[in-house]
């Protein structure tokens, strides 16, 4: 089976074209050499994949006939990635800034709730008459000359 089809069938990439692009960018290799999309994968091969700034290593146990379900993936590959790589991934996720910079886009639902909590809804409950709220009485009319 071709390596691009193999990486797609074991659900490492969402589409086969994305797998082919990553192979073209030399982010996938078998052993120590970079490969082309047409490279045939055999049982026992160790594939090195660079994805999300992490170097994954997977060993091919069995070649699937077509795309398989997520539960069946461990039957076809064995993950031999260094534990250090997963620790790096965990550190990167923790260090990411969750919130966007101030002034970028509209407030999220969470932001809106925090603003409502900070400001409070006392203003809306105190004023039931909008004329009183804006300081207008309605009785005053301007006479024209």
Image: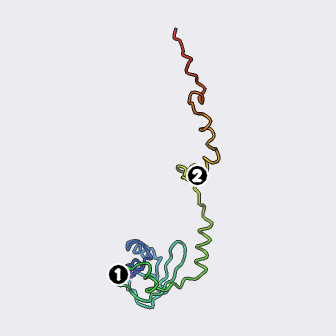
Residue 13 drawn at (x, y percent): 43, 74
Residue, x 50% and y 74% (percent of image)? 51
- Name the residue at the top extreme: 145
Which of the pair 74/31 is nearer the observer?
Answer: 74
Name the element at disc 2. helix
Label 1 to label 2: alpha-carbon separation: 45 Å
Q: Earlier in the sequence, mark 1 or mark 2?
A: 1
Residue 56 drawn at (x, y percent): 52, 80
Name the element at disc 1. loop
For label 2, the residue is: 111
Binning the other alpha carbons within 10 Å of mark 2 as few (below 14), some (14 to 19) or many (20 upward) gives few
Residue 66's disc is 1
Binning the other alpha carbons within 10 Å of mark 1 as few (below 14), some (14 to 19) or many (20 upward) gives few
| Residue 111 to residue 93: above or below | above
State left or right for residue 31 relative to residue 113. Answer: left
Quadrant location of the N terminus in the rendered image: bottom left
From where the camera sits, is residue 24 visible? yes
């Amino acid at each position: 089976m071709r390596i691009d089809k193999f990486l797609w069938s074991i659900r490492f990439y969402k589409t086969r074209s994305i797998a082919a692009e990553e192979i073209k960018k030399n982010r996938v290799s078998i052993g120590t050499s970079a490969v082309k999309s047409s490279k045939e994968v055999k049982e026992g091969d160790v594939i090195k994949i660079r994805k999300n700034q992490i170097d994954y290593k997977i060993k091919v146990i069995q070649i699937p006939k077509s795309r398989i379900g997520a539960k069946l993936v461990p039957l076809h590959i064995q993950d031999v990635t260094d534990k250090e790589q997963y620790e790096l991934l965990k550190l990167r996720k923790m260090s990411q800034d969750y919130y966007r910079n101030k002034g970028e886009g509209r407030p999220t639902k969470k932001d809106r709730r925090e603003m409502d909590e900070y400001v409070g809804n006392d203003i809306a409950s105190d004023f039931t008459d909008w004329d009183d709220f804006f300081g207008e009485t309605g009785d005053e009319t301007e006479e024209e000359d």
